[in-house]
Amino acid sequence: MQTIRMLLCGVGNVGRHLITIIAAKDALLRERYGLDLRIVGAVDSTGAAIDPAGLDLQRVLDAKRAGIGVVALAGGLPGQDGAALAATLDYDLLLEATPVNLRHGDPGLSIVRAALGRGIDSVLANKAPLALAFAELARLGSLDARRGDGPLLRFSACVGGALPTINLGMRDLAGATIERVEAVVNGTTQGILRAMESGVPYDAALAQMQRAGLAETDPTLDVDGWDAANKLVIIANAVLRQPTTLADIAIEGIRAITPEQLRAARARGECIVLLGLAERTDQRYRLSVAPTTLGGDHPLARMGADEMGVVYTSDISGRQCATSREHDPQPTAAAMLRDIIEIAQQPRHRADHQRIDR
Ligand SMILES: NC(=O)c1ccc[n+]([C@@H]2O[C@H](COP(=O)([O-])OP(=O)(O)OC[C@H]3O[C@@H](n4cnc5c(N)ncnc54)[C@H](OP(=O)(O)O)[C@@H]3O)[C@@H](O)[C@H]2O)c1
């Protein structure tokens, strides 16, 4: 049995779902993968709680449900800074799920830097560190197989929750040259556009997405296209291997789209989506996020309000499409779990932990 001691930064919608999944899947994780996953530290906006033997997950959930910070738990450390804890705690793997901060990336960026800088494998749900500092983080951690003793960096939850955007592009199109990526990877705008199309006002549609925990903490990130652009930055860097920042992307959100435009497109058999697009021109990819009218036969035009999708067109693998339907942040947490399992199956972890636990 491998024991993996994890530090969870961010115990909000995603973090709580991840805790719930880890608790519910304990037997399956042990039987199928030989994994004993323990959260030895949890950080929220009030501070941290730590327990080297593993926090009582039900108590963490109860505290958060009651609106109490993790500092109220046994092992509570009021005011404890996440990055400082990531730099000092004894743990094997970082789970990062704090809010997106596009100005300076923190707290997430400092937390990830601290973990990777110590050689600790890291799994991110928070896109901001990658959107702002992809090149630096990819030097600190490996996106592919482990380099020597270096840490792994995984972020499959960052681009559409459980939608396998990154895994499909990085793993399943190995050897192909990708000519075009089309991605509807912002669930909030997809939900809003489809709701407006059927007569629901913009404000009511946004409020519904917020109640479901699917909108960003700051919803302007969604409706003005920044969230989709962040995800395109990650796709461009990780999958297309083109060094990219937000400044390289032409970004237009959905505020100017009217119900009349949406209904008129439908009447023509078309569909308006917020599309992230990468088109290969010569040796570079041209990148944009904008409301885009798709023909009715396009795979992304057939998606419902709760769906996201990606289409890759490549030279040797044809056209590959994936869509996902997600009603809440649970699939995002599941994507973090798949990254944990993938990391756990890499040689260094297996060897280290088998040695420790026997
Ligand atoms: N929600 C989704 O469906 C989804 C999907 C894909 C990716 N993501 C990404 O996942 C991340 C988390 O999303 P979420 O919906 O779980 O957000 P959330 O509900 O707002 O939770 C954020 C968590 O971070 C904690 N936090 C805030 N400031 C902090 C600080 N300075 N230091 C340490 N912890 C801090 C919050 O503490 P309190 O609990 O004390 O407030 C909360 O526990 C975001 O980056 C988001 O973009 C979310």
Image: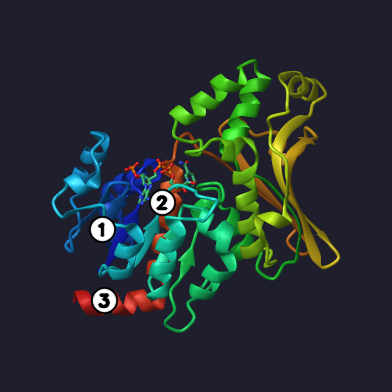
Q: What residue type is labelled 1?
A: Gly
The image quadrant where one finds the N terminus is bottom left
Please tell me whether mark 3 or mark 2 is closer to you in this view: 2
Q: Which amino acid does label 3 sit on?
A: Gln
Residue 281 shown left or right of residue 251 in the figure? right
Q: Which secondary structure lies at badge 3?
A: helix
Kindly identify the residue that appears in the image at 72 percent across and 52 percent down.
249
Q: Residue at x 17, y 59 (%)?
A: 51
User: Disc number at residue 97?
Assistant: 2
Please tell me which of labels 2 and 1 falls first in the chain. 1
> In the rendered image, which quarter contains the C terminus?
bottom left
Residue 109 percent across, percent down from the top left: 46, 60
> In the rendered image, which residue does mark 3 sit on?
354
Task: Calculate the distance from the C-alpha at mark 3 to the C-alpha at mark 1.
Answer: 22 Å
Q: Which residue type carries mark 2?
A: Ala
Regarding residue 75, the answer to whether it shows in the image is yes
Q: Position of residue 208 (x, y in %)?
A: 50, 24
SS type, badge 1: strand
Q: Earlier in the sequence, mark 3 or mark 1?
A: 1
Residue depicted at x 28% and y 54%? 42
Q: Work out how far the residue at label 3 is from the one at label 2, CA to CA, in angstroms.
A: 28 Å
Q: Could you say which is closer to the camera, residue 322 or residue 329?
A: 329
The quarter holding residue 16 reads top left
| Label 2 to label 1: alpha-carbon separation | 13 Å
Local SS, label 2: loop
Mark number, residue 41: 1
Q: In this view, does 52 lie to the left or right of 42?
A: left
Extreme right residue here? Answer: 282
CB of mark 2 near ligand 1 (< 8 Å): yes
Q: Please say if the residues under marks 2 and 1 sit with CB atoms less than 8 Å apart.
A: no
Q: Residue 161: give x, y in percent of width and height.
A: 51, 47
